[in-house]
Image (cartoon, rainbow, N blue to C red):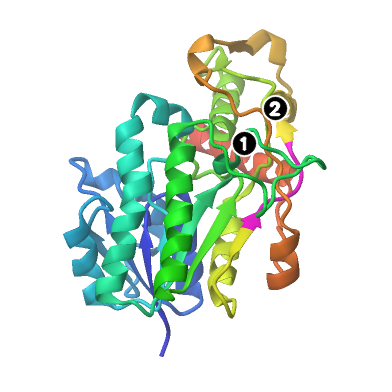
Amino acid sequence: MGKTAFITGINGQDGSYLAEFLIEKGYTVWGILKRNSVAENQTYRIDSIRNNPNLHLSYGDLIDLASLVHVLQKCQPDEIYNLAAQSHVRISFDQPIYTAQVTGIGTLNLLEAVRLACPKARIYQASSSEMFGNNIDADGYQRETTALSPVSPYGCAKVFSHNICCNYRNSYNMFISNGILFNHESPRRGSNFVTNKVAKEAAKIKLGLSQKLVLGNMEATRDWGHAKDYVRAMWMILQHDTPDDFVCATGISHSVQYLVDYVFGLLDLDVNQYVETDPRYLRPEELRDLKGDCTKMKTALGWKPEYTFESMMKEMVDYWMDFYTKK
């Protein structure tokens, strides 16, 4: 008999890829959705499996403990993947309290619900490279032992979630692992995140549907990987013999300027003609550089990424070119 998995944030980028991945492995997958007045837009990322008999969706919310207990009692999962969050860093400055409630306290609610309903389940917590802030080890990398010093409400909320998961793991002997994932992208990424914003707008410019791309800090560098590689890492983390914390990253970082130059080069567009910067898109406190060392994960789990930065961005550009060509 196959395993049962429960995913919060199942209709997000990571949740949708993870649900597909797990169903292919024979899992029964349960997920929760927030109630939305435009229901037809809620599940477009999981359209490919929407009618699969092994997929079960229920309304629920991380800030509603009762809804979590209800669905966990019903599905009795073997594995739990907590991917739901208010995950946009810039927006977390505009909605810091909501971000803290969902991204921080929401994790605590889930842990309490698990203790009540299915305490033997293995839990994956989506930690974030944003927790490191501007702390970088002497060799230029961030790893499991790098000090956490976040520079955004989102990063602060993730630090709370990360630490409360460690606390519950030690206090109640629960199988809880933190995956400290660096930036990961795909065509399913929200188009207000810089990678997909650049890919989408460049495609529109190429097709004559837009005249400019407006961005913020062009000098910031990020370690960008593909979401498909990273959800595979999530699963591998929960198959490990013991609960632990793992950095998941490519070990290669690029600047936003390089990202723009590469994407515009794919489409033979002049960056200087179409790209502008605007202070509105700057964060009150900037995170300058992120680059992860995933030696621990590679050694302990045998994980390695299949995508390169270039193949990932080409996939995203091709997606938007195809999307707007067919419209």
- State the image coordinates of residue 250 (x, y, percent, origin top left): 72, 50
Indicate the secondary structure of the residue bearing disc 1.
Answer: helix
Residue 73 shown in magenta: no
The magenta segment is: 247-253
Q: Are marks 1 and 2 in contact (CB under 8 Å)?
A: yes
The answer to whether 71 is drawn above or below residue 269 in the figure is: below
Quadrant showing the N terminus: bottom left
Front one among 98 and 170: 170
Q: Is residue 88 left or right of residue 143?
A: left
Front one among 151 and 254: 151
Q: Earlier in the sequence, mark 1 or mark 2?
A: 2
Q: Residue at x 57, y 23 (%)?
A: 207
Tag 1: amino acid: Val
Judging by the rendered image, the residue that carries numbered circle 2 is 267
The answer to whether 60 is drawn above or below residue 308 in the figure is: below
Indicate the secondary structure of the residue bearing disc 2.
Answer: loop
